[in-house]
Amino acid sequence: MTGTEYSALYVRSPEKAYQKLFDTYCNYVYAIVYNKIGRIASHEDIEECVSDIFSDIYFSYDTGSGYEGDMQGYVNTVASRKAINSYHRIYARISHYTEHDEETLGKISSDTDVEKDSDRSELQKIIMDMINQLGEPDSTIVIQKYYYDKKSGDIAKLLNMNAPAVRMRCKRSMNKLKEMLTKAGITL
């Protein structure tokens, strides 16, 4: 399903567009979610994450964006981000520490720098927010290249673009991201 097909179907019937989107990508999204959180999540957690992904796609996809390429790249990005967020939420829930006995406290590493870890986590959140502000397809390109270590040719296939265009957009996006970080007072 292309963005154009989805947008046209959405204009005629949002319900049919949602059903077609779900029918086309349900197994694909389920596989992404299962690969990201299947080790630690219950079946209900996985189902909830898949539902949340389709809700996000349905309510946030801009049908007027003019994006004509295959929706798979967009679906992949939304699914991956949502699954990673779910992983962190579920992991925090299952690893929540409630016992305060001597034995357990003794297992905590004394070289753990909670403040540094917290700062790093906050910086990662800020950077991800700024990457999201780049918009599509730039945010997808940056995430696929630097988080998933994909080559420009692979990203180009995913987004129905050519490799030189992906490299150029990536370079421009990184320059823009650098400017955004500098304005925010963050130097890496």
Image (cartoon, helix red, strand yellow):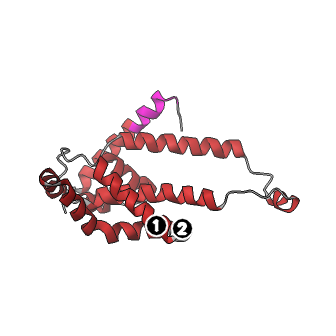
Quadrant placement of the C terminus: top right
Q: Which residue is mark 1?
A: 46
- Horizontally, residue 178 falls left or right of residue 67, namely right
Residues drawn in magenta: 177-185
Which image quadrant is residue 21 in?
A: bottom left
- Horizontally, residue 81 falls left or right of residue 99, namely left
Would residue 172 be visible to someone looking at this image? yes
Q: CA distance from mark 1 to mark 2?
A: 6 Å
Graded by Cα atoms within 10 Å as few (under 14), some (14 to 19) or many (20 or more), the crowding at tag 1 reads many
Vertical relation: 32 (above or below) 138: below
Badge 1 element: helix
- Front residue of 88/137: it is 88
Would residue 160 be visible to someone looking at this image? no
Residue 183 belongs to magenta span: yes
Residue 113 locus on image (x, y percent): 73, 46
Give residue 183's mark. Answer: none
- Horizontally, residue 92 falls left or right of residue 153, namely right
Graded by Cα atoms within 10 Å as few (under 14), some (14 to 19) or many (20 or more), the crowding at tag 2 reads some
Q: Which residue is mark 2?
A: 41
Q: Main secondary structure of the magenta part?
A: helix
Vertical relation: 184 (above or below) 170: above
- Front residue of 169/99: it is 99
